[in-house]
């Protein structure tokens, strides 16, 4: 007698699977230059449309168009392109080093390089980033972080600044405004808000930049962070890197279907932007806008960066099991390196020759750094930090029971 149809549970599925091409029409994109640029003191509610649009600057011909196209020093753009090439060379070589069993694990940021690198160039010294494991560009864009030392972390060797205690890629560089990476997803998002609040309490001028992936937005800490950031108008940029995938899980199952992650921000009273993450100029301009808001006591900004995870999730993952092998080549927002390269060439500030020369330069640089790092030990030769140092830094002062355990270990080894 019941006239209604039985209820059905909706389980989101990606349109593409191995052997079946992705229909990227789910990804709403706007033409370059179309989305408006509000004043930095815009109210959060006044950004609602921006949370559903897509801020883009570079058009298909590599021209910078529209209200978000700002005067950017060509040297900054050249630095950005070089840093992207450096990051790509580093990632490619470290992947091989993992296959050669020199390091136990690695995570690339292939296809996402523009986001961390352009963002870093828009921040100021003293600002603090709270990254995930996929923002190595924040470090590689800098000249003061030795690549050798980063590789020593990957190798957990004698010169590993973290003394072999952390999984490879979980870097920590306080002096570079790069907060210690944690394996627990999303924890850094709320910590960044707290750091921003502290900066405000102290009357400082520094701002925080929080990072999270699309998948990890489903964690409770994401929501806590938005609430605190809004309530206290914390000087923080809340970056959501939507690379479409969380390991084998499509972004729709994290809540991205029929809405956007940027829209979460507006709902929490936070100014929000949805931005082409493969457009270096858009990333730079949006980051500058958000940083200016934060630094002017206008509160937090949430930015959803639309990009695509070009590589496997990690060296433990095989994406051909769950998505089309050539998916990245069909992604409508292209490759961030190719797009900035095209723009700079059209400005006369870069050339094909310079591009090839820079690629070679970084391959050589990474190769040399890897070789040097290996001198301090690698997974392959079993060289690592001393076992006794394992008990240090658990507490500020080593408690008696840890001293006993350490002595026990030292006694056994002598
Ligand atoms: C609290 C917690 N749950 C699960 C994991 C396992 N894990 C590591 S990475 C990952 C996927 C994260 O995806 P996303 O946030 O989209 O970031 P992406 O890897 O795509 O950059 C998962 C589930 C974890 N590290 N921590």
Image (tube, rainbow, N blue to C red):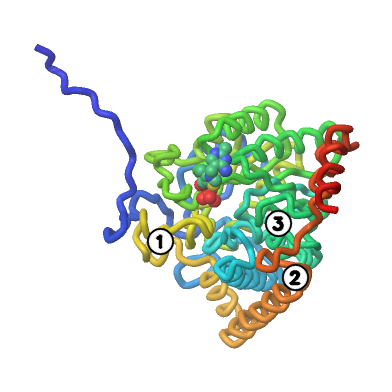
Residue at the image point whose x is 90% and y is 37% from the top: 397
Residue at the image point whose x is 76% and y is 47% from the top: 128
Closest to the observer: 344 or 84?
84
Q: Mark 3 and mark 1: span between their CA atoms?
A: 25 Å
Reading the chain from its start, which is encountered first: label 1 or label 2? 1
Image vertical order of residue 186 relative to residue 62, above or below: above
> Which numbered tag is attached to residue 186?
none
Q: Position of residue 153 (x, y in %)?
A: 72, 59
Q: In the rendered picture of this protein, how many numbered marks are placed on residues?
A: 3
> Which numbered tag is attached to residue 332?
1
Mark 3 lies on residue: 122
In the picture, measured across the screen, residue 148 lies left or right of residue 53, that is right
- Viewer can see residue 121: no
Q: Quadrant of residue 79?
A: bottom right
Ligand 1, seen in the image, is in the quarter at: top right
Image vertical order of residue 198 relative to residue 367, above or below: above
Question: Is label 1 or label 2 in front?
Answer: 2
> CB at mark 2 closer than 8 A to ligand 1?
no
In what quadrant of the picture does the N terminus appear?
top left
Image vertical order of residue 10 relative to residue 413, above or below: above
Crowding at label 1, few (<14), some or many (≥20) Cα neighbours within 10 Å?
some
The residue sitting at the left extreme is 1
Image vertical order of residue 210 relative to residue 383, above or below: above
Mark 2 lies on residue: 373
In the picture, measured across the screen, residue 347 lies left or right of residue 400, that is left
- Determine whether the residue tagged by mark 2 lies in a helix, strand or loop: helix
- Viewer can see residue 126: yes
Reading the chain from its start, which is encountered first: label 2 or label 3? 3
The residue sitting at the top extreme is 1
In the picture, measured across the screen, residue 317 lies left or right of residue 89, that is left
- Determine whether the residue tagged by mark 1 lies in a helix, strand or loop: loop
């Amino acid at each position: 007698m019941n006239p209604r149809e039985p209820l059905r549970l909706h389980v989101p599925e990606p349109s593409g699977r191995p052997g079946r091409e992705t229909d990227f029409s789910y990804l709403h994109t706007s033409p370059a230059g179309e989305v408006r640029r509000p004043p930095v003191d815009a109210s959060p509610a006044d950004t609602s449309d921006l949370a559903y649009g897509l801020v883009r600057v570079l058009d298909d011909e590599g021209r910078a168009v529209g209200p978000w196209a700002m005067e950017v020093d060509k040297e900054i753009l050249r630095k950005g392109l070089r840093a992207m090439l450096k990051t790509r060379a580093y990632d490619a070589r470290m992947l091989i080093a993992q296959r050669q069993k020199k390091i136990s694990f690695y995570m690339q940021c292939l296809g996402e390089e523009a986001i961390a690198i352009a963002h870093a160039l828009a921040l100021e010294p003293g600002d603090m980033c709270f990254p995930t494991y996929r923002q190595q560009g924040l470090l590689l864009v800098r000249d003061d972080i030795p690549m050798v030392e980063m590789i020593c972390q990957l190798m957990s060797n004698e010169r590993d600044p973290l003394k072999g205690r952390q999984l490879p890629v979980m870097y920590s560089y306080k002096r570079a405004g790069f907060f210690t990476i944690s394996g627990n997803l999303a924890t850094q998002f709320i910590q960044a808000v707290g750091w921003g609040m502290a900066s405000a309490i102290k009357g400082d001028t520094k701002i925080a930049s929080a990072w999270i992936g699309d998948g990890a937005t489903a964690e409770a800490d994401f929501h806590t962070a938005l609430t605190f950031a809004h309530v206290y108008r914390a000087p923080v940029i809340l970056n959501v890197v939507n690379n479409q995938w969380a390991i084998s899980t499509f972004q729709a199952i994290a809540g991205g279907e029929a809405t956007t992650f940027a829209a979460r921000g507006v709902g929490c009273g936070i100014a929000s932007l949805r931005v082409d993450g493969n457009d270096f100029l858009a990333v730079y301009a949006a980051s500058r806008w958000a940083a200016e808001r934060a630094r002017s006591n206008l509160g937090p900004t949430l930015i959803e960066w639309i990009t695509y995870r070009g590589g496997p999730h990690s060296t433990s993952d095989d994406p051909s099991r769950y998505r089309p092998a050539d998916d990245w080549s069909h992604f409508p927002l292209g490759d961030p390196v190719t797009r900035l390269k095209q723009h700079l060439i059209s400005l006369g500030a870069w050339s094909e020759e310079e591009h090839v020369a820079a690629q070679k330069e970084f391959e050589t640089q990474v190769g040399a750094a890897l070789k040097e790092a290996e001198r301090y030990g690698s997974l392959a030769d079993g060289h690592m930090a001393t076992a006794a140092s394992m008990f240090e830094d658990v507490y500020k002062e080593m408690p008696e029971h840890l001293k006993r355990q350490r002595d026990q270990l030292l006694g056994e080894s002598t």
